[in-house]
Image: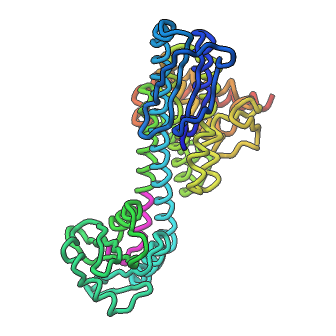
Amino acid sequence: MASIRDYLFDTAFLDQSIDYLAETLDLAITVLDSEGLAIASRGSEGCDTSVSRTYPFSFSSDIGSIVCAAPNQALLNQAEPHILYCLASLNSQLLRETELREITEEMLQLSSQLNFLFKVAKKIIGIDDLKKCYQIILDEIFQAIKADQGFIHTKGRWDEEIRVTHRMTDEEVNSTRNSICLKQKAAGSTIICTREDGASLLYSPIKEKDCQSGQIVFIRASGHRAFSASEKQLVAIIENIISPTFETLRLYDSLQDLYLNTVKALAAAIDAKDPYTHGHSFRVAKYAMTIGGQLGLGNQQINDLEIAGYMHDLGKIGISELILGKPGKLTHEEFCLIQKHPVFTDKILQPIKLPTHILEGATQHHERMDGSGYPNGLAGANISLFGRIIAVADVFDALTSKRPYRDALPVEAALRTLCDGIDSLYDREMVLAFISALRAELSKEELADINMGLRYDDIHNLNQFLIELKEFALDANRN
């Protein structure tokens, strides 16, 4: 049996709705599950319930209904517009939360696949034996999709034949390559087909430039479940990065680009929920990388910092657009929900098993040096390096970008705000590094590439202002 409570992330609105119908309209309200069993009721004790009407929830499957009862038909008819309004609101909440769950599941699945690709890439870095490289790829995919048998048949450096297998003899490979289902259906894309003996085959071509140079095939014996669409998708991704080349580092580079581009696409999807934050994650990532470069971080750390910057607002996918784009002051409840977005980010990213410093950077950027931040009230050195860097980058971009409730601040005003919060809100070293980077590394043109909308009080004297601002911050430290 299923009920509406199974599909709501927060059931408070359901409770508020039935309280309203019972107390304000003097109705007896019962919420039923798909089996007709009551899961909640209001106003039923001692009430005359001579007339009742059932209102099913609108959902892809039966999750029950609301039964409204009144002493007479006239009272029920009079209350019906209110009932329908509450029902429509609940159905809308169900739809939004279903969409959120589906998006989250897709993101987690894609993230898992990307994590797998990185794992494979790291294992083949530095291997100059192409056959050994293919064997590692075959074995890793074999374990990931839990196949019974598998092989790769392709060309090597000088067009020599390369064949690697997992639990297969050469005779079995030849027989499979000649199977009718592959000859009839095999083409330039990944497919699933059933062999004459009932075995499920997962086939993917290996391509080199514009031609096919080989094939990778996995087999699941008759009597076992057939390959799934998600397994096909994973092998299809592998298909796009395998090619007969001895430059195995190129595989790692392709995977890194794929991973970063996917992260960028996810960040763009989050920013698109609110037109006022369009490009925010991109800008925060670039500002954070600039601070990291000024601090002397290595290339890998700066790459990781970029990923954390792009992911820092991922949890906002769970926040309503109406709240994110609200032009007026947020209510206490709305602000509390906004404060949960780093927690949502953490829940989304935890299954990916990213390096800890990336996860911390993505979830700690609203923590403050004096412990007044959220979501965990961390203070000082308990906030990670990435978290302290992204906090400065995030605030600077927020201040210099237009919002529904205010215009964008000039660069100078935003930097003064950061300096006013040194040691209490923001890490002094990160703020000074950002100011130094603006002076030494970023030209006005480069800043414009990051944010074309930046405004200045006096762009011609910006460098002198930055010098004075840095001296002010250093003097405050000495005092």
Identify the residue at image location x=42%, y=77%: 138
The color scheme shown is rainbow
Question: Going by the image, does 123 lie left or right of 365?
Answer: left
Q: Which of 10 and 125 is in front in this view?
A: 10
Quadrant of image for the N terminus: top right
At x 23% / y 72%, what residue is drawn?
A: 186
Asked if residue 66 is among those painted magenta in the image, a careful observer would answer no
Residue nearest the observer in this picture, 41 or 164: 41
Quadrant of the rendered image containing residue 39 = top right
Residue 178, above or below 299: below
Q: Quadrant of residue 313?
A: top right
Q: Which of 177 and 62 is in front in this view?
A: 62
Q: Is residue 462 above or below residue 26?
A: below
- Residue 91 location (% of width, % of height): 46, 28
Rendered-image quadrant of the C terminus: top right
Left or right, 17 with reference to 168: right
Residue 296 picture location, percent across and down: 61, 51
Q: Which residue lies furthest to the right in this view?
A: 479
On the picture, is 343 further left or further right than 290?
right
Q: Position of residue 380 (x, y in %)?
A: 76, 39
| In the image, farthest residue toward the front | 50
Residue 40 seen from this side: yes
Magenta segment = 243-257
Asked which quadrant contains residue 26, the reply is top right
Vertical relation: 325 (above or below) 278: above
Magenta segment includes 255: yes
Which residue is drawn at the image coordinates 64% and 51% (left, top)? 357
- The chief SS type of the magenta part is helix
Q: How many labels does the image show?
A: 0
Task: Evaluate whether residue 290 shows in this view.
Answer: no
In percent of the image, x 39 and y 85: which residue is there? Answer: 164
Q: Is residue 74 above or below residue 108?
A: above
